[in-house]
C-alpha cells in the first residue's frame, strides 16, 4: 500500500474468514501508517491479527482519537491467542487478559509501576466482546476513560 498518509483505517474480517492478516501476510504493513486518527477492526482472530493491532496502536498511540474493536467472541479469541502464542514460546502459561498484557502491554498489577501503551488524544472508544477480567483498572488507565467523550462497551 502506498497510502501512508491514511488517517482512518477500518478492517473487517469475519472470524471464519480465510482472508485474515495471516492469509494476507506480506500484502501490506500497517507500521507504515503513522497518521491514523481512527482505527477500527471487526473480527480479528489470529495471533497475526492481534500483533497487527498492537503494531498499529503502537505507531499511532499519540494521535489516535477513535478506536473501535469488536472481537466477536472473547473466549474463542482467548483460546486462539493461547494456542498461537504458545506454539512458538517456551512460556505455556495462559495470560489472565491477553489483550491488556500482550497487546497493550499494561501490567495487571498496578503496584509494579510499569506502563504500557496510553492514548492521550483518545476521545471515542468502542470495545465489543473484550473482557475486562483482572484488567479493569489497567484498561481504564490505558484508554484514559476519564477523558473520553464517547464510550461503548
Image: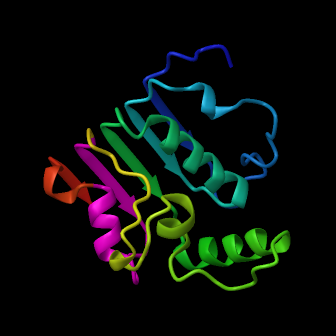
> Taking 62 as reference, is 145 left or right?
left
Residue 43 in picture, x, y percent from top left: 57, 56
**Who is closer to the viewer here, 143 or 90?**
90
Check if residue 67 falls in the magenta segment: no
> Taking 51 as reference, is 7 left or right?
left
State the count of labels.
Answer: 0
What residue is at 24 percent from the left and 55 percent from the top? 144
Residue 8 in picture, x, y percent from top left: 43, 28
**Residue placed farthest to the right in the image?**
88
Examine the image and state in which quarter residue 77 appears: bottom right
The relative height of residue 2 versus residue 42 in the rendered view (above or below) is above
Residue extent of the magenta highlight: 122-143
What residue is at 30 percent from the left and 37 percent from the top? 65
* Picture quarter with the C terminus: bottom left
Residue 153 visible somewhere in the drawing: no
The relative height of residue 59 versus residue 140 in the rendered view (above or below) is above
> Taking 70 as reference, is 32 left or right?
right
Residue 3 in picture, x, y percent from top left: 59, 15
What residue is at 57 percent from the left and 17 percent from the top? 4
**Who is closer to the viewer here, 109 or 19?**
109
Residue 35 visible somewhere in the drawing: yes
**Who is closer to the viewer here, 11 or 137?**
137
Examine the image and state in which quarter residue 111 appears: bottom left
What residue is at 85 percent from the left and 69 percent from the top? 88
* Picture quarter with the N terminus: top right
> Taking 75 as reference, is 39 left or right?
left
Amino acid at each position: 500500500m502506498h497510502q501512508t498518509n491514511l488517517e482512518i483505517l477500518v478492517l473487517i474480517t469475519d472470524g471464519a474468514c480465510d482472508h485474515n492478516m495471516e492469509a494476507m501476510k506480506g500484502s501490506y504493513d500497517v507500521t507504515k501508517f503513522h497518521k491514523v486518527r481512527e482505527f477500527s477492526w471487526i473480527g480479528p482472530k489470529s495471533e497475526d491479527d492481534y500483533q497487527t493491532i498492537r503494531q498499529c496502536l503502537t505507531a499511532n498511540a499519540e494521535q489516535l482519537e477513535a478506536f473501535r474493536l469488536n472481537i466477536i467472541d472473547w473466549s474463542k479469541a482467548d483460546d486462539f491467542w493461547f494456542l498461537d502464542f504458545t506454539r512458538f514460546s517456551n512460556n505455556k502459561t495462559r495470560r489472565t487478559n491477553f489483550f491488556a498484557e500482550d497487546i497493550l502491554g499494561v501490567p495487571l498489577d498496578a503496584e509494579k509501576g510499569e506502563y504500557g501503551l496510553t492514548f492521550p488524544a483518545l476521545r471515542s472508544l468502542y470495545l465489543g466482546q473484550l473482557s475486562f477480567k483482572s484488567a479493569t483498572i489497567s484498561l481504564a488507565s490505558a484508554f484514559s476513560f476519564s477523558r473520553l467523550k464517547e464510550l461503548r462497551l
